[in-house]
Each structure stands twice: as C-alpha cells, then as structure tokens.
Amino acid sequence: MFSGGLTACFWPIILVLCLSRNTNILPVAEAIWLTIPSSGTKCVSEEIQSNVVVLADYYVIDENNPDQIPTISARVTSPFGNNLHHNENATHGQFAFTTSESGNYIACFWKDGSHKQDSELTLGIDWKIGIAAKDWDSVAKKEKIEGVELVLRRLQGIVEAIRGNLVYLKDREADMREVSEITNARVAWFSIASLGVCIAVSVLQIWYLKRYFVKKKLI
C-alpha cells in the first residue's frame, strides 16, 4: 500500500498518461502488419522528432506457403533521403538508429527476385520509438534499482518524453503559424497589386476609347 502523499504524487502522472493515451504525444511501441504484393514496394512512415531512439524488428511469413521461408529486401531512409538501413535476401531483420533531424522516416519492403511465387507476403514490424525503445531491465541491473523505484524511473522517463513531444509540437505550431502569416501577407500584397493592375487597365481602356471616339468624331 502506498501512503497518501505518494499516491497523490502519482495522480498528475496518471492523468497525463490518460490524456495522452489516444494522441501522438507519448512515444509508444507499435506492432504493424503489412501485406507485401507480389510486385512493387510496401512502405510505412512515422513522423519523428530529432534525437529520438528508434528500434524495430521485422519478419516475414507466407500464409500460402508456410513451409517455405520467403526473403525480402528492406530499406529505411531519413527525411533528407539518407540511407539508415538496407538489407537484402532476409527473412527477418532489425534496425536501430537515433534520429538526427525531424520529419517522416520511411521504411520500405519488397520481395526479392529469388522468391518466385506470385503470392503475397505478410510482414510483421515491431516498431519502438523513444522511451518505448529503452531496455529497462538493463537499466535496473546497471543502476541496481527495482520495485517502486524502477516504476518511478519509468514514469519519469515517460513524463520527460511527453514534455519533449509537447515542446516539439509547440515549435512546429509556431513555425506553421509563421509560414501562415507570411503566406497571408504575400496573398494580401498580391491581391492589392492585382487590384491596382485592374484599375490601371480600366483607366487605360477608358482613355483609349475616349480618344478613339473623339478621333472618329463620334462624341
């Protein structure tokens, strides 16, 4: 049983976790199933901020030929197109990296030419980001902590991850607002310029028509 003071300390953390459960604020582990077509590439992307640890395991099965182990090729690229992981003729694999820039990280998979069957392949991905990719068993052994102290350490890591994502979202919102304001200002100036051009063209048309009619002695 926790004392009243300790229980009260947990309530803000529990509240934050409940509020962020259905949002992208909290980095979590995701299990994804993909169907790789007989020809072509299947990709999955995740928007991740910089300085975040990413760990993923993937493996393939052939539901139509369970006794045959199919092989695939995999490639992971950064938002700037840098190659972070490349694997060929693999039935399973793993990639791990720390993001260096914010943006969409893309993982693509396709069948190898050695797999002659036309059937589709099923790919499973265990994608872990941020605090979800941390090995807490190793942390507990290294720092010799357990029980409530380990739980508190994990909660502290989760809260720090939430705070980091909130700061990231706030910065992105500020950048988007700045871009929106610049765009609105440019559109306003373009509208004013367009209106000025229309007025100038109208005045020139009236002047030309008046001169034409006077020259033809119609007025």
Image (cartoon, grey):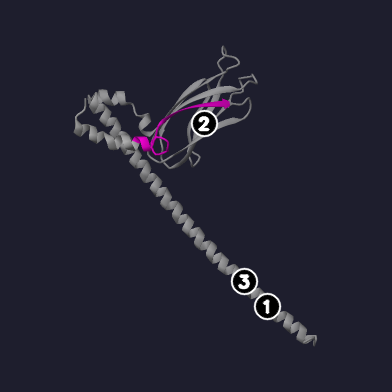
Above or below, 98 relative to 87 = below
Q: Residue furthest top?
A: 67
Mark 2 or 1: the one toward you: 1
Magenta segment range? 17-35
Q: Along the horizontal axis of the image, is 120 left or right of 155? A: right
The residue at which mark 3 appears reads as 197
- N-terminal of the pair, mark 2 or mark 1, is 2
- What amino acid is labelled 1 in the image? Leu
Nearer to us in this view, 14 or 81:
14
The residue at which mark 1 appears reads as 204
Q: Along the horizontal axis of the image, is 65 left or right of 20? A: right
Among the 4 quarters of the image, the one containing residue 99: top left
Q: Secondary structure at mark 2?
A: strand
Task: List x then y, in percent, for residue 79.
Answer: 48, 41
Q: Along the horizontal axis of the image, is 110 left or right of 218? A: left
Label 3 vs label 1: CA separation?
A: 10 Å
- N-terminal of the pair, mark 3 or mark 1, is 3
Crowding near the residue tagged with mark 2, few <14, some 14–19, many ≥20 C-alpha atoms within 10 Å? some
Nearer to us in this view, 218 or 2:
2
Q: Secondary structure at mark 3?
A: helix
In the rendered image, which quarter contains the N terminus?
top left
Say which residue appears at 26% left-offset and 34% top-offset.
Answer: 10
Crowding near the residue tagged with mark 1, few <14, some 14–19, many ≥20 C-alpha atoms within 10 Å? few
In the rendered image, which quarter contains the C terminus?
bottom right
Task: List x then y, in percent, for residue 73.
Answer: 54, 26
Q: Is residue 114 magenta?
A: no
Among the 4 quarters of the image, the one containing residue 139: top left
The residue at which mark 2 appears reads as 75
